[in-house]
């Protein structure tokens, strides 16, 4: 139990760390990528507006060209956040389409010649997009479609990719370190829970053993009294309560034994269909004798692996619960679905409302409806069923599809 709880704690902690770290890294890298794209688009907008070239304010000339883009600010930047050196450090090329002619300008790039530039521009125009990426180039097409400009983003994209890879490796290292720390500290954090659970197990075991002797003595003395003075309301009440306490002690002992197994049991292959038939025969007679209807249906020869005696106990617990609380009918079904054996048991229960009933598997849990029904019970039976199902790696759940019906479904793996 403690091992499972610790594994769940570690899994939950690591899932939270991974999700948060993934969200942070995704956000950081996304911002980095979009900044590169926005910067390239800003440069492209200037180039498109100026016919495929950078230009200086009117009256200033250099080897790049001249024009009317905003002058430099005192901090060395231009409007739009571009540095004064942007025209000189940006590698770009463009292709103009005029009067059926294609003119390529590749003076500001070394890796692309005029023929390649025209070929790239033609491919971009075929795509029909105004902006996008062509390899490591970010491109923009003028509104009229007569100018295609491409900016080399190799360095920026390489830096972005290197940052992405670095963040991934650092994150993986961080996750590994956090995992080690969680594994080390989880033992200390969960130690009080483990100690409390062990005390609970010892209490159940000790209480079960301690109660057996006085119950046996009370039962024996009650029988002697009945022999000597005859049966009375008092002796009948004593016998009833002794029987109730004896059943509770038996269930508590079963729970204690299941806890001590720690998932270990002798597995054999056996017919679940035959086991169910035997349990149905046993409880079916009781149900029909009480004037209730039974509907039993199951596939033949469904074989599973596990402890047959425990599985029979699980089925008996479920049928006992159904017989106890049913009013008019009990319906059971066993069928093979893929590599699973699916068992469902349904009974009517007027006070049950539709919804999930998983809390019914809690130890000593009894619903208000069960208490109000005045039916004898300790709230341990379904807990035993849950423990046995867990031992066999089976799933078991309780629910009500509609008001007035209670269903338990157990799904067993077929080896």
Image (cartoon, rainbow, N blue to C red):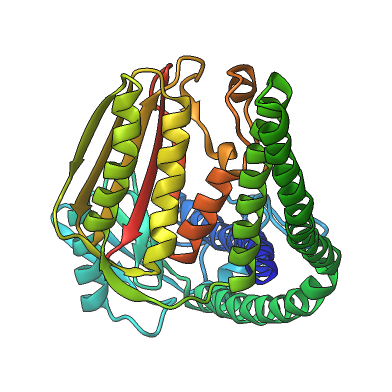
Up-down: is 236 above or below 176?
above
| Of the pair 270 and 184, the residue shown nearer to us | 270
Up-down: is 374 above or below 136?
above
The image quarter containing residue 327 is top left
Q: From where the camera sits, is residue 62 visible?
A: no
Residue occupying image coordinates x 67% and y 39%: 223
The image position of residue 378, as x and y in percent, is 64, 38
Outermost residue, front side: 228
Q: From where the camera sits, is residue 325 visible?
A: yes
The image position of residue 247, as x and y in percent, is 61, 45
The image position of residue 118, as x and y in percent, is 22, 69
Residue occupying image coordinates x 66% and y 81%: 176
Instruction: Please give left or right for residue 4 compared with residue 268 in the image.
Output: right
The image position of residue 31, as x and y in percent, is 61, 57
Up-down: is 142 above or below 378?
below
Residue occupying image coordinates x 61% and y 62%: 15
Query: Total of numbered circles in the picture?
Result: 0
Residue occupying image coordinates x 47% and y 26%: 325
The image quarter containing residue 287 is top left
> Which quarter of the rendering shows the N terminus?
bottom right
| Of the pair 49 and 388, the residue shown nearer to us | 388
| Of the pair 279 and 113, the residue shown nearer to us | 279
Instruction: Please give left or right for residue 405 compared with residue 386 in the image.
Output: left
Instruction: Please give left or right for residue 67 compared with residue 114 in the image.
Output: right
The image quarter containing residue 117 is bottom left
Up-down: is 77 above or below 293?
below
> Which quarter of the rendering shows the C terminus?
bottom left
| Of the pair 81 and 6, the residue shown nearer to us | 6
């Amino acid at each position: 139990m403690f091992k499972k709880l610790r594994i769940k704690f570690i899994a939950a902690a690591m899932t939270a760390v991974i999700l948060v770290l993934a969200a942070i890294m995704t956000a950081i890298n996304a911002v980095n990528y979009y900044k590169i794209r926005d910067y390239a688009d800003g440069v492209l907008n200037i180039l498109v507006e100026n016919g495929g070239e950078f230009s200086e304010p009117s009256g200033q000339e250099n080897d790049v060209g001249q024009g009317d883009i905003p002058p430099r600010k005192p901090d060395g930047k231009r409007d739009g956040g571009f540095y004064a050196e942007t025209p000189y450090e940006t590698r770009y090329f463009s292709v103009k389409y005029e009067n059926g002619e294609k003119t390529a300008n590749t003076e500001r790039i070394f890796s692309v010649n005029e023929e390649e530039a025209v070929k790239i521009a033609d491919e971009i125009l075929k795509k029909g997009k105004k902006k996008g990426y062509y390899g490591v180039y970010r491109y923009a097409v003028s509104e009229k479609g007569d100018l295609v400009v491409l900016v080399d983003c190799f360095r920026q994209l390489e830096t972005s990719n290197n940052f992405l890879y670095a963040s991934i490796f650092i994150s993986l290292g961080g996750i590994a370190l956090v995992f080690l720390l969680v594994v080390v500290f989880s033992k200390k954090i969960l130690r009080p829970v483990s100690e409390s659970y062990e005390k609970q197990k010892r209490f159940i075991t000790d209480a079960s053993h301690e109660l057996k002797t006085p119950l046996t003595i009370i039962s024996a003395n009650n029988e002697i009294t009945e022999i000597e003075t005859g049966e009375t309301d008092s002796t009948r009440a004593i016998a009833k309560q002794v029987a109730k306490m004896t059943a509770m002690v038996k269930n508590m002992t079963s729970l204690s034994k299941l806890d001590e197994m720690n998932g270990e049991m002798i597995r054999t292959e056996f017919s679940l269909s035959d086991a169910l038939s035997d349990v149905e025969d046993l409880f079916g007679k009781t149900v029909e004798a009480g004037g209730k209807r039974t509907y039993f249906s199951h596939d033949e020869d469904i074989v599973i692996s596990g402890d047959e005696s425990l599985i029979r106990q699980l089925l008996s617990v479920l049928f006992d619960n159904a017989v106890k609380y049913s009013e008019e009918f009990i319906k059971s079904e066993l069928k093979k679905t893929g590599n699973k054996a699916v068992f469902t048991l349904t009974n009517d229960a007027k006070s049950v409302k539709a919804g999930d009933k998983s809390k019914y598997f809690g130890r000593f849990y009894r619903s208000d409806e069960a208490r109000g029904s005045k039916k004898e019970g300790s709230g341990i039976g379904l807990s035993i069923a849950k423990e046995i199902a867990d031992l066999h790696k089976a799933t078991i759940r309780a629910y009500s599809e509609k008001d007035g019906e209670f269903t338990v479904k157990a799904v067993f793996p077929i080896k």
